[in-house]
Amino acid sequence: MQYYLMRLISRMIRLLPDRAAMGLGNALGEVCWHLVPRRRLAMMLENIQRALNLDRAAAYRIAKQSSARFGRLLVEVLSTQKYSRQNIKDYVEFQGQEHMDEAVAYGRGVVLATCH
């Protein structure tokens, strides 16, 4: 049952224009931010303050932005079926193809690291 529900939600998200889907993701992230348990929030703030040597207000902004990204991430994950060999270049920019070609030419395999 849960599987089919997620498939249905995924299909509905894929029907949305990209901007609308990201808007939905932002809204979900905002809702989720307000659901973070206080204990978890305190831990996030303390970790950010220690790691980055920031005051509490700056740590709060970073924690909120980071947590709110999960809504967009969820929408992106549920949208992955819309990508194909034919349209992937509309969504992904590959830079440094010449480095990839050179590495492949050695014939020993290549490890790719990406970020989003």
Image (cartoon, helix red, strand yellow):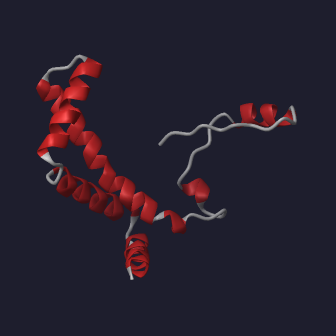
The residue drawn where x is 34% and y is 58% is 22
In the rendered image, the quadrant that contains the N terminus is bottom left
In front: 104, or 5? Answer: 5
The one nearer the camera, 59 or 24, is 59
Looking at this view, name the residue that lies furthest to the top.
53
Residue 61 visible? The answer is: no
Q: Where is residue 61 in the image (x, y as percent from the top left)?
A: 18, 34
| Quarter where residue 38 is shown | top left
Q: Is residue 29 visible?
A: yes
Q: Vertical placement of 23 versus 92: above or below?
A: below
**Residue drawn at 60 percent across, 58 percent down:** 88
Q: In which quarter of the image is residue 16?
A: bottom left
Residue sitting at x 25%, y 54%: 29
Q: In this view, does 79 lie to the left or right of 41?
A: right
The picture places residue 98, in percent across and down from the top left corner, at: 74, 33
Q: In this view, does 4 lie above or below 49?
A: below
Identified at 42% across, 81% down, the residue is 4
**Would you say 88 lies left or right of 63 here?**
right
Q: Position of residue 30 (x, y in %)?
A: 19, 53
Count of marks overlaid on the render: 0
Q: Is residue 63 above or below residue 70?
A: above
The x and y percentages for residue 91 are 53, 54
